[in-house]
Amino acid sequence: MFGLQRQKVLDESRWKPRDQLLAYTEAWSYPSPQIVATHDCYQQGFLTDPEVDEWLYQRGKFTQPNHAQLGKSNGAIRLLICERLGWRPLGFAMNKRSFLAVEKAFGLPTGTLPLLDQNRGEHSCQFKLSAANSVESVAIMLKVPQMYQLGNYGLALSHSFETGITVAFLHGSGVLAEISHVTGEKIIPHAERIQGLIKSAISLWTHPLLLPVILLEEHLFRANEFKSCVLSRNTTSIEFRLGVTQSGRLSNSRSPFGLAELRELMGNEEARIETTALLSTTMTDTIHFITNLKWDHRYCKFLHAVCSQIKELQVSRLTHSERELKASIDTLECATASTSDHAVSIKERLDLQLSMLYNFVAQADSSLNFKMAATTGLDSSAMKTLAFVTVVFLPPTFVAHVNV
């Protein structure tokens, strides 16, 4: 169904291999997780574009590690990570031929490329049946909604219930790059935490939902960091500047109610513009933030639904990990609701400050209009009365237009 869209994105995308912007992660599972933890069953590293084929088919230095003493492997994760280059057109830090090889070897869904080209948040799941009409594999795709402070990446994976092996392709901005393409500032790549979470979740390596759940955890981690370090801090700063809020951390912060700051704000046009810009930016970011969290909430419901479908398959190797993974999804769902509630409260605080700022600016403009009107006829009581009525009953913006 997505063949036409896939070909369009394939033709229009920018394919340019870059050093240290293509990486892999492998985790081989064995029946005893306790023993696995003491052996070198986890590997990660960077790839050059010519090495992609060798890694895909486990040749040369990428040959599967020999752990005969651990018995037969009961599953694995094989993840290829690719940095997104630029904004438009869609860019990949790899050759087109290499991507096509990944698409074929991993059996990625046809909708992978169209998904990665989207700005909105999406997720889907498809179970594949064998000739005997039994479920043999599952394909999952997800794309987080674009907001550079939280992430802009997508994942496509395929999991075989027979072998327990998950193969996946992760692509996005900031997954490997250490410099933000938006701000030019140094950042922590998403892959750093994602790989750390994979490495620590040994008992879940055979479950197809491990990677989708880890990406949700990473998204919520960035969301909480942005909320605490930017949105909440900016909101408190705005409340301090306007000076009429003495609640929470601003309790007893100054006395009496920051009158000096209020006078500075009302009399200094530059200060008003600066505060207005900060308020507008923070409000806009908060609105986008709340929208992103709505996707996280829907995504939690999606994960619960897929988890229930997988449980119905009664795969013996997943019996223990299903309970653990469901508990993780429950925890993340609770975190999503909590973060969303806090974000809504921040927006309500900003709404209040916006009203206060409007009143301050209106008072400052009205005061100026009153003075201008009064000076046009110092000996005319009628003119002064008209100026007073104008200030009291008309909006300051209307008065400003009249006086121009």
Image (cartoon, rainbow, N blue to C red):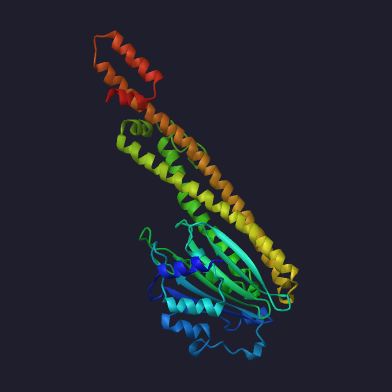
Locate the C terminus and report the quarter of the image it occupies: top left
Residue displayed at 52% across by 82% down: 56
* Occupied quadrant, residue 262: top left
Residue displayed at 49% across by 37% down: 351
Give the camera-side residue of 365 and 306. 306
Q: Is residue 374 above or below residue 76?
A: above
Give the camera-side residue of 298 and 268. 298
Give the camera-side residue of 72 and 192. 72
Query: How many discs mark residues in the rendered view?
Result: 0
Q: Is residue 48 visible?
A: no
Give the camera-side residue of 331 and 9. 9
Q: Is residue 284 above or below residue 117?
A: above
Q: Is residue 382 above or below residue 32?
A: above
Q: Is residue 243 left or right of residue 307?
A: left
* Occupied quadrant, residue 362: top left
- Residue 375 % position (x, y): 24, 17
Residue displayed at 59% across by 66% down: 212
